[in-house]
Image: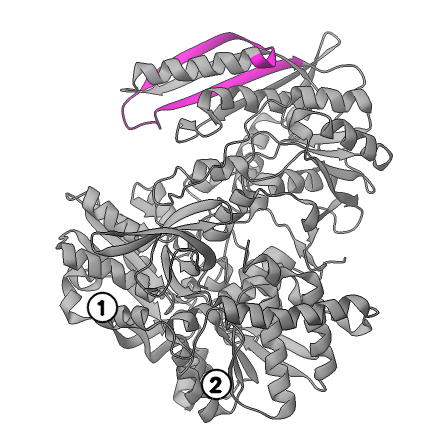
Amino acid sequence: MAERAKTLMALSCPVPLPARDRVLLGHGSGGKLTAELVRDIFLPAFQNPALSRLDDQAVVNINGSRIAVTTDSFVVKPLFFPGGDIGSLAVHGTVNDLAMGGAQPLFLSAAFIIEEGLPMDVLRRVVSSLKQAADDCGVQVVTGDTKVVEKGSGDGMFINTTGIGLVPEGVEMSANCARPGDKVLLSGPIGDHGIAILAQRKGLEFESTVKSDSAALHTLVEEMLKTTRAIRCMRDPTRGGLSSALNEIAAQSQVGIEIEERAILVREEVKGACEMLGLDPLYVANEGKLVAIVESGAAEETLAAMQNHPFGRLARNIGTVTENNAGLVTMRTLLGTTRIVDMLAGDQLPRIC
Amino acid sequence: MCLAIPGRIVSSEQENGLRIGRVQFGGIFRNVSLDFVPEANVGDYVLVHVGFAISRVDAEEAERTYQLLEEMGALQAELPPSEELSGPE
Amino acid sequence: MKYIDEYRDERIARALAREIAERATQDWVLMEICGGQTHTIMRYGLDEILPHQIELVHGPGCPVCVTPLETIDKAIALALRPDVILVSYGDMLRVPGSHSDLFRAKAEGADVRIAYSPLEAVKVARAHPDRKVIFLAIGFETTAPANAMAAWQSRREGLSNFSMLVSHVLVPPAIRALLSSRENRVQGFIAPGHVCTVMGYEEYEALVRDFHVPIVVGGFEPVDVLEAVLMLVKQLEEGREQVENQYVRSVTYEGNRAAQDTMKEVFEVADQKWRGLGMIPRSGLRLRAEYAAYDANRIFDLELVSVEEPAECISAQVLQGLKKPTDCPAFAIRCTPESPLGAPMVSAEGACAAYYHYRRHAVAS
């Protein structure tokens, strides 16, 4: 008995792994690892005030005009998915990043990195979709680039879009502007895009009618800004989900953010997929949603304006900014208890456990 | 461990001598092996773990025991809040 | 979703908590074995609504956490071979081995793929006859029947390029080992509902008889866990010691015979090393001799040097419920999910990870 007890108490722990010497897939997930990469490599290299605000876009001053500039790379697989494709995504993603700064999106560049052997027809379809999306947004693709890489070096196609827009007078939104008492508004149900993509993935195949929510939100933002200028910041919760977006704001503003589980909408199909795979919708990507931190006095009218717009019909007030628990996002659960909504380290993985 | 969730069998068929069912979870569908639940039929709920149904949900038992829980819950709603309920971690 | 949402009902949960508070006349230490139950407790803050007399401790119920270091190292070594495709459940990818993990191996060029179901690994083998496909078959009894089917199907089809690296653990021997320890504080157990869905709960009667502790088979939603706690408290207050079943919608006394038969056909009981706990006799499964051609442990010759150093990690004590993650001096400081010192911080179901992820410190509401 004593022998067995001794065996049980034997510690057999691994040594901690050394500091990362290679870039991992998790570094692109939008969670903590990505933040680490930005903090440890990119920020120290480029150091400047615009960059250090770490917003979805940078607002710079050129001869008195406030120009918003942003860049994004699109590496989605499969290239075509329910609700969109890499072309339309490349437009929506960048337009949205501009819109999150309150900018009117004007021009895009589109750089293509194409894998040798990609059927020309696929390229045509993607370009056509990109053009359609740009037209719908009222932006022009004014410049671009093409590179071809050897077979096996890319997932068929990668696209980078850089966008520029104009920020109107008096619009000052940034992730460091949230203040205790502000309200948190979410434009609609979460998790659609991530699940739509996951449903196509080999090894996890399931049938679903979930469509990506990929959409351009600049007109929604316009309506919100017409209603009030008391909007502190906006984020579109893409990779890393709602959790990453809120955690970034909490960190940049050094405030706490408390959200209500009951108030967050999740479509039935998205919920089913998440339950089956053991995923938390808070960490699943969205491509047509925004979260806005609004001064409490202006919250009700802003919400009404959102609900009046096709991309905000299901908008909800999901929480409050607080003074305590600065830097943390917490959630009041369905049972009325509190849990932390932590920033994920890398990608969320389906689990059996 | 052992993430297993309940889903409803929508259809079933034989494939290579194995019984496969199309199971609905909320709004999604997935093919699930029904070999461990020969007694489960279309319309039944099964508990699914890693693509295999490991039990047929006993709807009657679930109903019966849930009724009792429901009654407890209804009673709870009428009572004043208890001071005992907040325990520190 | 039916059979899920109604078991997350706030009123019922609070009613159960209230009843527990009324029934408990003294302090009780209860252990839940299953990582899924730990997850639920943390994620829904059940420790917040339970009365202070109830102390919930977490057991070694995470098969990912207890997979031996050697197995991870073997999986990584195999994955790095150019002719190998390693297929695994998602949970295993981040678990640190002695020097690396499967994610890093992937970054170094290993062909590592995630599967939701073991049958997908068999599919990969069919699709790539020129490569050796190895499936990392881990889990408790819940997953054993499914993993067994993968082996059974491959053998039936005569696939020559499929094998499994097996590391299965069994729950009752682990509970027996915990209860045998002189330091055991646990007075009642919540047995894992999905393990019992497969195995039934007959095996737990011997534990009750030998150690005089009540055991309740519990489900995984908040209402299930609370109801199981209530049933345990009632037993303890009334001086009863039995095996009871809370998870009646899924668990029966005999369990799933068809699943058990498949398990028995493919696997046999063996001694098993548990990471953080050490060797527990007859607490694991291995492939039977007839399946030797599908046993990666037998097919592949691997010379491994495993590193086992005492570290700050107190996972042994956490896994036995002797300490809480928050008792560990390294918790959330030197040991985090991004740089874990031990297994319970790695798996999403591990106690330390659950504490870190959901509750970290007593969050001011």
Extent of the magenta region = A136-165
Label 1 in the same subunit as label 2: yes
The image's mark for residue A35 is: none
Q: How crowded is mark 1: few (under 14 residues within 10 Å), some or many (20 or more)?
A: many
Asked if residue C239 can be seen in this view, the reply is yes
Residue C331 x, y percent position in the rendering: 59, 62
Q: Is residue A341 above or below residue A149?
A: below
Marks 1 and 2, Cα distance to the nearest angstrom? Answer: 30 Å
Residue found at x 15% / y 44%: C129
Viewer-proximal residue among A194 and B24: B24
The residue under the point 43% across, 56% down is: B43
Please state if A99 lies on the left or on the right of C215 as rendered.
right
| SS at circle 1 | helix
The residue under label 2 is C179
* SS of the residue under disc 2: helix
Our reading of the magenta stretch's main secondary structure is: strand
Relative placement, left or right, of C102 versus C22 is left
**Nearer-the-camera pick, A47 or C343:** C343
- Residue A48 placement (x, y as % from top left): 65, 25
Q: In which quarter of the image is residue A171?
A: top right
Circle 2: residue type? Leu
Q: Would you name the residue on which mark 1 appears?
A: C266
Name the residue located 75 percent from the left edge and 9 percent from the top edge: A64
